[in-house]
Amino acid sequence: MIGQLRSELLKQRSTQTTLFLFLAMVGFVALAVTMHVIALSPARLSTNAHQLDVFQIGTRAAMIFAGLAGALAITAEIRFGTIRPTFLVEPRRSPVLAAKLAVGGLVGIFYGLLAEGLMAAAATIAFSLRGIPNELTGGDYTRILLGGAAAGALWGILGVGVGALVRNQVATLVGILAWMFLVESVSEGFVPGAAKLMPGGAGLSLAGNEHKLSLAVAAALLIAYAAAASAAGWLATLRRDVA
Amino acid sequence: MSPQTSTDTVKAEAGKHPLEASVVECRTLSKHYGDVVAVDRISFSLEPGTVTGFLGPNGAGKTTTLRLLLGLAQPTSGDALVFGRRYRELEHPLRQVGAVLESSDYHPSRSGRDHLRSLALAADLPPSRVEEVLELVELRNAAGRRVRTYSLGMRQRLGVAAALLGDPDLLVLDEPSNGLDPAGVRWLRTFLRGLAAKGRSVLVSSHLLAEVAQTVDQVLIIDHGRLLAQGSLNELTGTGQTLEDVYLELTEGEPA
């Protein structure tokens, strides 16, 4: 099992994928800061709730990129065929899936801390440059970082599970992006009561928006989503033939 | 092979001492994909120390048979055993069986060395073994480069290196000479003969008959999922026919 874990970590380090995802995330955060922190009028950035909403773009980035990284951990192997040698080494397949879920969680923590840290730093600096009083407390910052790391970890696991189930790389990545940018975004506008219960909505509450869901409910929901996706992906991996 | 002390049920069934189990054994092996019968009740067994050619036209069921043998796909019925067990039940699969399935099974932006290291880590093999197999297939100098820069021949040799990581007793290769230049083909032939001389067994699928005739001891001929002939090269070509004559007679006599 230790060997499988080290193998998965090496796979993460030994391609350019991690670098590309990282650069894309930096671009995403830069765009978000420009649109929401620099472009919004001071009146719309005056309260703690307003400012938290802006900071939460970091949580969105954390979840999206953790989900993509998790999905890539399995779908890249299927796309390039390395899943065959991987399963020849470990034909029981379960240890491979377990290692991928663990590494998906680890990589998710990495993206969570990075996205939240980048966004929080950029937003804090931008507020200060524009002379807008910072209404966030130290507790808010801690919650954003730790909650973002947890949301990233669970989304990384979710991504591995969905990728193992769907298998097709493009379909999986497009599916995750469409879910976040279409389904959840539209739901937030029209059915906020349902949106806050979705995987992205639960992640946002986990990293700060307590007025929507309590920490315990948000954590339980997101853990349930990650567990369900992992279980489905796991079963599919054990049962299906490798093409 | 590691010493076997357990009372293994599969082997007891076969009525053989563990060490005498066939290297490869298929028992009425079938695989259906919906209405398509890819492999149709194939039975054969291979003895240690032989190089066996697995011949048949494209789409005959060679690759499917090899995937069933290697646990990548589940048989619809029947059994495919290596060393008397299903592949999934082997304790150290890489130390017993090495396989080269497709020349493209690499992440293009990973180096050859990292590809091998990721497999060696998962199989609990030491990093020094990666350098040994790189040396063996003459890829040491290119090992640090990304696989996308490799020629087809280099990819094939990297595949062979991966298969040799565990120093296995059986090597399974699917169409290994596809895309190899003459020097590569000769290298592969010499290499496979060398393995057999050391008592290792080789199962190699191909449709390049002239090449096969120079490399193998015995052949299995398959078409439309069915095993049409099995025997040593001498037995099959005993009547003065070439392997090509025998092969075409068998495979063209089949209704499409």
Image (cartoon, coloured by chain):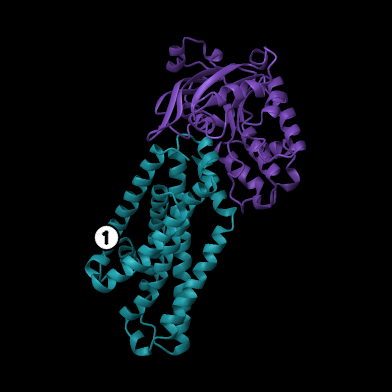
Chain colours: A cyan, B purple
State the residue in front, B160 or B140. B160
Q: Say above or below: B211 vs A81.
A: above
State the residue in front, A162 or A209. A162
> Residue B40: percent from the left, percent from the top?
45, 25
Q: Say above or below: A241 vs B197.
A: below
State the residue in front, B39 or A152. B39
Number of callouts: 1
Query: Based on the displayed image, in which of its 4 quarters is residue A59 positioned?
Result: bottom left
Q: Chain of mark 1?
A: A
Q: Is residue A113 visible?
A: yes
> Residue B232: percent from the left, percent from the top?
64, 15
> Residue B236: percent from the left, percent from the top?
64, 15
Residue at x 61%, y 17% (from the top left corner): B48
Q: Is residue A106 visible?
A: no
SS class of the residue under badge 1? helix
Residue at x 40%, y 53% (from the top left corner): A157
Q: Left or right: where does residue B124 sit relative to residue B10? A: right
Query: Based on the displayed image, in which of its 4 quarters is residue B10 positioned?
Result: top left
Residue at x 47%, y 51% (from the top left corner): A75
Amino acid at dot 1: Ala
Please give the residue where the numbered disc 1 appears in the rendered image. Answer: A216
